[in-house]
Amino acid sequence: MFKLFNTLLIKYADHRLLFAPVAWFIIIAMLLWYIAGSASLPVMLGLMLLIIIAIQIHLYRQTCADMDYQQRNIQALIDLHSRMDFRLPLPSLDNWTASPELVARIFHLMKLHRPGVIVELGSGASSVCGGYFCEHLGSGKLITIDHDSNYAQLTRKNLKNHTLESYAEVRYAPLTECDVNGSRHIWYDLKTFEDIPVIDMLIVDGPPRKTQLLARYPALPLLFSKLSKNAVIILDDASRKQEIEIVKRWITEYPGFETEFIPSDKGLYILTRKSES
């Protein structure tokens, strides 16, 4: 039985779609059988048919959404390769890393705002792309932070292979307890940021959600004093409930920012300083 489920490639994300309707159907079917006996069979068959139709409609819409997402990413990749002279193949850009759509958006914002210092929370393929962007624009330095020493070392190796050490550096920062507006949070070791006088662009793609509730909330409170007057903040995975709550808290506690939501696959929030009237 378990081998059958593995063959079907049923993922955790599918449980809500597949198992919840089946569980409800079994419960309702048992109640109907208890109340009406065999006379309830037509009702149960009709209910089962409705569940199957509903799942098929959901799968169709999900497939359309996935195809649209893939098309946007392909377009973003084509755009990036037409603009950049990548010396080696890029690390994988997928759902587990930065998507091509996110990377292309970062390039657009860097070209628009020309940041001097870019701090990225969470290293990976986007760090390599960021190094290329700084090289292409002829300005800017990327400092990427990672709490995982293995990922930090891998990103450092990729930057070296692409000869981008002059444009991007990796810093290992273990997660430690810190005080954030009177509350205890687990976040990157603040000593890692001490020698960074100003941040023109902050890319928030870490720590991981599993770290704690609202894991990425501390980024703005702890680094606010280092943000330049024209600073831009990019928050990835912004379609998640926790990230939506994080942005609500940020703009409440720091009302000097304007927000823009980009409805990509995982969602993206862009925060910019409000223009002075």
Image (spheres, grey):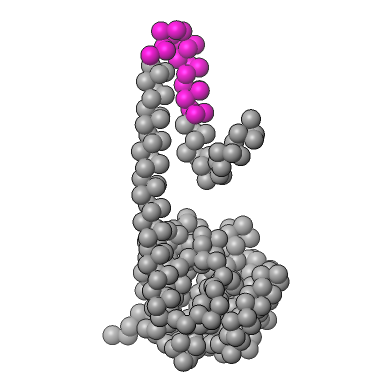
Residue 71 seen: yes
Residue appearing at x 40%, y 80% in the figure: 83
* Quadrant in the rendering for residue 232: bottom left
Is residue 78 depicted above or below 59 in this figure? below
Question: Magenta region: which residues?
Answer: 22-42
- The percent position of residue 254, horizontal first and vertical second, equals 44, 74
- The percent position of residue 276, horizontal first and vertical second, equals 32, 85
- The percent position of residue 87, horizontal first and vertical second, equals 54, 81
Residue appearing at x 51%, y 42% in the figure: 14
Is residue 16 depicted above or below 161 in this figure? above
Q: Nearer the viewer, residue 173 or 14?
A: 14
Q: Nearer the viewer, residue 64 or 190?
A: 64
Residue 272 seen: no
Is residue 71 depicted above or below 256 in this figure? above
* Quarter of the figure that contains the N terminus: top right
Using residue 263 as the reference point, say whether residue 169 is left or right of it: right
* Quarter of the figure that contains the C terminus: bottom left
Q: How many marks?
A: 0
